[in-house]
Image: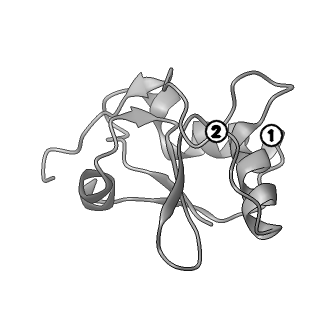
Amino acid sequence: MIGLNPNDPGKNENEGFDFNKRIAQQLDFSFPYVVDATSGLALAFGASRTPEAFLFNAEGKMVYHGAIVIDRNDTVLRKAVEQMLRSEKVETAKTELSGCPILWRRNS
């Protein structure tokens, strides 16, 4: 797993890497969180909002797409990962996105 920030940091500091890195730490996400310097990877996945999760199994099949957290007590992505790792069907394969639109970088 990897967290990816495609936002242009010059457009809104609250959507930038440093701010969202603190949020990821508060939610105890243990995966790496990096910058998508061109927004190219986010574009390739068809991402539209932050945060937005794409979870693929070992065969490369997308088993979950949607929100990371519905509320502080319901981390749907964590549940999806746990189910996938137990070779169970992911109960909730898609959720609505509620984050902010991606602040695309001009060179993307």
Q: Residue at x 50, y 20 (%)?
A: 98
Marks 2 and 1, the one that precedes in the sequence: 1
Is 93 situated above or below 83? above
Which residue is more in the foreground, 94 or 19? 94
Q: Which residue is mark 1?
A: 27
**The N terminus lies in quadrant:** bottom right
Amino acid at pointer 1:
Leu
Q: Are marks 2 and 1 in contact (CB under 8 Å)?
A: yes
Q: Residue at x 58, y 34 (%)?
A: 67
**Rendering quarter of residue 95:** top right
Is 60 situated above or below 62? below
5 relative position to 107: left or right: right
Is 87 situated above or below 82? below
Percent x, y for residue 81? 73, 57
Q: Which residue, as the protein is rendered here, is positioned at the far left?
A: 107
Q: Which residue is mark 2?
A: 68
107 relative position to 43: left or right: left
Spatial CA span between label 2 and label 1: 10 Å
Q: Residue at x 24, y 40 (%)?
A: 104
Q: Which residue, as the protein is rendered here, is positioned at the far front?
A: 89
Q: Find numbered disc 1 in the image and state the secondary structure of the residue it sits on.
A: loop
Which residue is more in the foreground, 18 or 29? 29
Amino acid at pointer 2:
Ile
Percent x, y for residue 37? 32, 60
Q: Find numbered disc 2 in the image and state the secondary structure of the residue it sits on.
A: loop
Q: Residue at x 60, y 39 (%)?
A: 20
Mark 1: few/some/many CA within 10 Å (<14, 14-19, 20+):
few
17 relative position to 42: left or right: right
Percent x, y for residue 54? 50, 53
Mark 2: few/some/many CA within 10 Å (<14, 14-19, 20+):
many
